[in-house]
Image: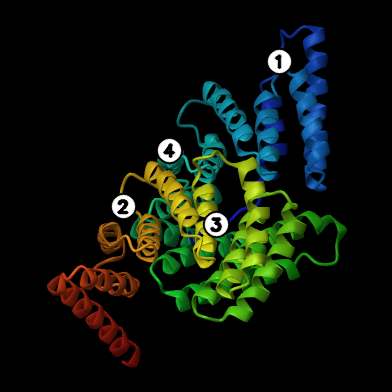
Amino acid sequence: MRRVAKKCGNVSLWLIPAAIQLAAAFAADTATPESKLDSHRAAESNRHGVALVERGKLSEAESTFRSALADCENCVALGSILNNLGEVYYATGRFSAAGPLYERALALREAKEGSDALVLLPLLNNLALLYRETADYARALRFAERARSIAELHNAVETAEGGTAFANLGEIEQMQGDLAGARKWLRRALSIRERLLSPSDALIAETLSDLALADRAEGRFKTAAELYRRALAVLQAASDGKQGSAQNDKALLAVLKKSGVVLSNLGQVEAEQGHLKEAEQIARQSVADLERACGPQHPSTAAGYVNLAKILRYRRRFDEAGQALLHAQAIDRQAFAPDHPRIANDLSLQAALAFDRKRYPEAEKLFQQSLAILSCRFPAPQIEIGRLTANLAEVYVREKRFPEAASAFDQALTILERTLGPDNAELVPTMEHYSQVLRAQQDFAKAASLEARAMKIRVTRTLKRAA
């Protein structure tokens, strides 16, 4: 897969003190002295935990929030504590632990404010982002749609949280393969953010990076690279504006996280254009930045290692690529369920490395495992399923299993035509390899038809470049 996780964390610290103050407004006058003491102790621990997060001490913050939760059986700060502990779990890549906490916090806020209250927006956006990361796209979409609906109901579309709702919708549509829908929402999010935020705000860079993914998926690598470089320029400006103050250390790390992810994606685009030496340098810088900003065991760091492994594979340094991939797999297996698309991505790269080493039975098994995960997650045709099916067909060719190869090529071509369009340049290699198998089976008419289509796509692309 070409995607890499784009976020290392989601610690929305500006929300936390406000949440504490809001919760305090609902303190019950009838509380017993013991419960008042527990509530006060929990609130103090909560505030202390926020201060620790602001200093980047997530491990200590987690312990403090857990202590606050133990003191807060039903205190007024419960929703804030749940949300804050969920933020720490999310920031450290423990997505399955964060979800139930966010949902409990949302239920408490809904019970107090109503199901359409504007104050639900941050929690709904957090949940949409969380379930997108865990590839539960149906649930992520429900929360994102609720956030958009509430923003529109309260005329809050042109706000930071309204922009986040649209960005989440775009990212979810993109993950599901709806590139047109993704562009629509992401462009709207970008428009809102450019009007509301400073030109050096990291959220603008994040949206540009998301838009680049759609261009990458359709093979427009030059356009994607330009968007990534625009995003990096925004992040560099954001970093320059935060230099010279110890208070800004956390903000600088947050920027470093985002720039590390953008660099990782840019490295892939450079590799896809054949700039392999430059791509490797970019990928190594990305891994170093992600390890510093997110920690060595974070899923975003793992994604950086996966992208580095892909580039090393393109450079035919298979042993180094295998080591980078093994490191990423160890992290991903701790962070994600066995049927998560990230696991499928890792298996697919492992299969490609086995193919390169001519270990075809191993490659076939790994490609099939990856396909099984993606086919279960994405019942509708999806670009990555088409690509994986074409790769599996190549394995069958090497094993001289031509009827199975022809069937797999036919299936891959059908999926890629449906998702990329009938005239996309990415179809050409699959068409040409399929035609070779058809000729081996003496199906000359169908082979000639495919070769003519492939030639037409090549000529049209050449003419467009020359125009």
Q: Which residue is mark 4?
A: 146
Q: Secondary structure at mark 2?
A: loop
Q: Earlier in the sequence, mark 4 or mark 1?
A: 1
Q: Residue furthest left?
A: 445
Q: Residue furthest bottom?
A: 466
Give the image location of residue 237, x and y in percent.
68, 71
Residue occupying the far front of the picture: 400
Q: Secondary structure at mark 4?
A: helix
Rounded to the nearest whole Å, what is the CA distance between mark 3 and mark 4? 39 Å
Neighbour tally class for label 1: few under 14, some 14-19, many 20 plus, Cα within 10 Å: some
Q: At x 25% / y 57%, what residue is drawn?
A: 407
Tell which circle, 3 or 1, labels the residue nearer the N-terminal end: 1
Name the one closer to the observer, 111 or 171: 171
Disc 1 marks which residue?
Answer: 73
- Residue 152 visible here: no
Mark 3 belongs to which amino acid?
Gln
462 on left or right of 188: left
In this figure, which residue is indicated by the disc labeled 3? Answer: 350
Residue at image mark 2: 381
Badge 2 or badge 4: first in the primary sequence:
4
> Horizontal and vertical percent for residue 212?
48, 67
First of labels 2, 3 by sequence position: 3
Amino acid under label 2?
Answer: Pro
Q: Decide which of 426, 292 is in the foreground and name it.
A: 426
Contact, CB < 8 Å: mark 2 with mark 3? no
Residue beneath the point at 53% across and 47% down = 343
Which colour style is shown? rainbow
Using a 10 Å C-alpha cutoff, classify the residue at mark 3 as few (fewer than 14 neighbours), some (14 to 19) or many (20 or more). Answer: many
Q: Amino acid at mark 1?
A: Glu
Residue 97 percent across, percent down from the top left:
63, 32
